[in-house]
Image (cartoon, rainbow, N blue to C red):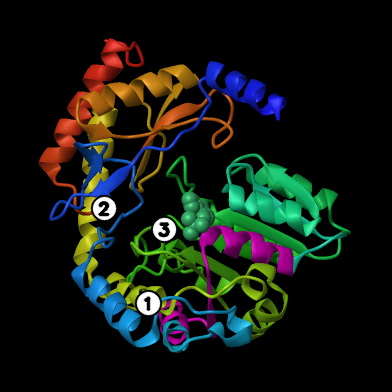
């Protein structure tokens, strides 16, 4: 095991080692986190709509805990398919306006399992270079060809589609909103290409579910592309504030996944109380338009404050705001300086993002007030100037 120590030392020297910090919620203040005894403004959470401590969700989970017990005891296909599942999957299909919905334990397992169920050796997956790691791992596990196209580069995708024209099944897969950059996929063009080349299209709405669409259905719905997408994937761990993931699509797709998606077949079903909590969260996501509106206002305000200060934060409109600083050490020092000023905003480094693009990834919540965001942007600008990330 000596090699491990050596490799870890090398990681630490390159400012690439990761370690855990302890966090607790701050009651009555959902936009904050208690980190090792200090209350910090939380600009690094995916609790976009502020539902993670919602009393109605807590109550739904408590009730289910008392009636259904703690664990589900088996995988869904054995005896773990407990009452709350059916109810949630019906509401999911209705919300997404699809024939059927399927709950999977988490987004990582949904992406890796579904891709593995759709394609195998001899097939090809066309995947944006900035897609989430769970998509990348799904392709690797599937043993199909991995055709990665440059980020949002449709000409490059077309070249690859031509190159792999003769492969058996073709799957195009993309994040709807890219998790580390906060910008959108070019979904209209992806739909046109999928049609032209006879490919399947899968869209990961992890960072767009709850945020876009009239009832938070996601970006595909917002853009009127729902029916053109074959596989809708989303998570319950971000806007929903809970945990878990879903796939929506045709009845045939869901029937296929029940038979072929290994993470669903070979893993214990989520606890029933959690599934009941997700159902309650879905009701709130659909009904609480004000949360989406507030989040969108907050994103506009924070983005314009950083732009006016002179930062380059890309071209997104989502609550994910990347501040690219380049090297790993600068990103770590920037994050520590923010922490000293009372802001939790983590440094994101390779391999999560490409080499030379280390960044602070800010993510906002509907619970943040204008005052908090303006003050935070001022503080970020001051540190940016002090560290030479921003030129005066
Ligand atoms: N897809 C994307 C785009 C994500 O950002 C994430 C989580 N960071 C996942 C999938 C995985 O979801 P989960 O956390 O539920 O495993």
| C-beta proximity under 8 Å, tags 2 and 3 | no
| C-beta proximity under 8 Å, tags 1 and 3 | no
Question: Quarter holding the C terminus?
Answer: top left
Direction front: furthest residue: 1
359 or 292: which is nearer to us? 359
Q: What distance separates the C-alpha of mark 2 from that of mark 1? A: 31 Å
In the rendered structure, which disc, 2 or 3, sits on the residue that comes first in sequence?
Answer: 3
**Residue receiving disc 3:** 208
Please state the horizontal and vertical placement of residue 357, each as a whole percent of the image. Answer: 51, 26
Q: Is mark 1 within 8 Å of ligand 1?
A: no
Please state the horizontal and vertical placement of residue 289, each as a whole percent of the image. Answer: 23, 68
Instruction: Place residue 35 in its image quadrant.
Output: top left
Residue at the (22%, 54%) spot, across then down: 366
**Residue receiving disc 2:** 296
Please state the horizontal and vertical placement of residue 297, each as a whole percent of the image. Answer: 21, 50
Question: Tag on residue 273?
Answer: 1
392 lies left or right of 73 = left
Check if residue 108 falls in the magenta segment. Answer: yes
Please state the horizontal and vertical placement of residue 109, each as a whole percent of the image. Answer: 59, 62
- The secondary element bearing badge 1 is classed as helix
Which of the two discs, 1 and 3, sits closer to the camera? 1
366 lies left or right of 123 = left
Q: What distance separates the C-alpha of mark 2 from that of mark 3? A: 12 Å
Which of the two discs, 2 and 1, sits closer to the camera? 1
Check if residue 368 falls in the magenta segment. Answer: no
Residue 8, relative to residue 230: is it above or below? above
């Amino acid at each position: 095991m000596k090699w491990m120590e050596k490799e870890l030392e090398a990681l630490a020297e390159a400012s690439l080692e990761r370690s855990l910090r302890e966090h607790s919620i701050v009651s009555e203040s959902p936009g904050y986190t208690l980190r090792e005894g200090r209350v910090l403004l939380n600009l690094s959470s995916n609790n976009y709509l502020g539902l993670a401590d919602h009393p109605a969700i807590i109550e739904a989970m408590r009730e289910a805990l008392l009636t259904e017990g703690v664990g589900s005891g088996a995988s869904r296909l054995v005896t773990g398919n407990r009452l709350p599942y059916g109810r949630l999957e019906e509401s999911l299909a209705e919300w997404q306006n699809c024939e059927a919905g399927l709950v999977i334990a988490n987004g990582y397992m949904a992406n890796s399992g579904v891709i593995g169920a759709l394609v195998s050796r001899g097939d090809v997956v066309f995947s944006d270079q900035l897609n989430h790691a769970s998509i990348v791992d799904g392709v690797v596990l599937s043993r199909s060809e991995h055709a990665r196209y440059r980020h949002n580069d449709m000409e490059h995708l077309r070249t690859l589609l031509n190159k792999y024209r003769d492969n058996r099944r073709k799957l195009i897969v993309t994040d709807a909103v890219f998790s580390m950059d906060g910008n959108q996929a070019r979904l209209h063009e992806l739909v046109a290409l999928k049609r032209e080349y006879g490919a399947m299209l899968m869209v990961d709405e992890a960072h767009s579910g709850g945020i876009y669409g009239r009832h938070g259905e996601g970006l595909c719905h917002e853009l009127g592309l729902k029916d053109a997408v074959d596989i809708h994937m989303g998570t319950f761990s971000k806007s929903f504030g809970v945990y878990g993931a879903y796939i929506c699509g045709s009845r045939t797709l869901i029937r296929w996944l029940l038979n072929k998606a290994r993470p669903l077949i070979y893993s214990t079903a989520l606890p029933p109380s959690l599934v009941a909590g997700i159902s309650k969260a879905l009701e709130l996501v659909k009904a609480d338009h004000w949360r989406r509106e507030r989040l969108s206002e907050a994103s506009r305000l924070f983005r314009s404050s950083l732009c006016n200060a002179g930062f380059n934060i890309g071209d997104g409109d989502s609550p994910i705001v990347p501040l690219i600083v380049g090297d790993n050490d600068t990103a770590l020092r920037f994050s520590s300086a923010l922490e000293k000023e009372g802001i939790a905003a983590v440094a994101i480094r390779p391999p999560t993002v490409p080499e030379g693009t280390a960044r602070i990834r800010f993510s906002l919540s509907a619970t943040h007030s204008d005052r908090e965001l303006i003050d935070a942007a001022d503080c970020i600008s001051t540190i940016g100037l002090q560290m030479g990330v921003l030129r005066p």
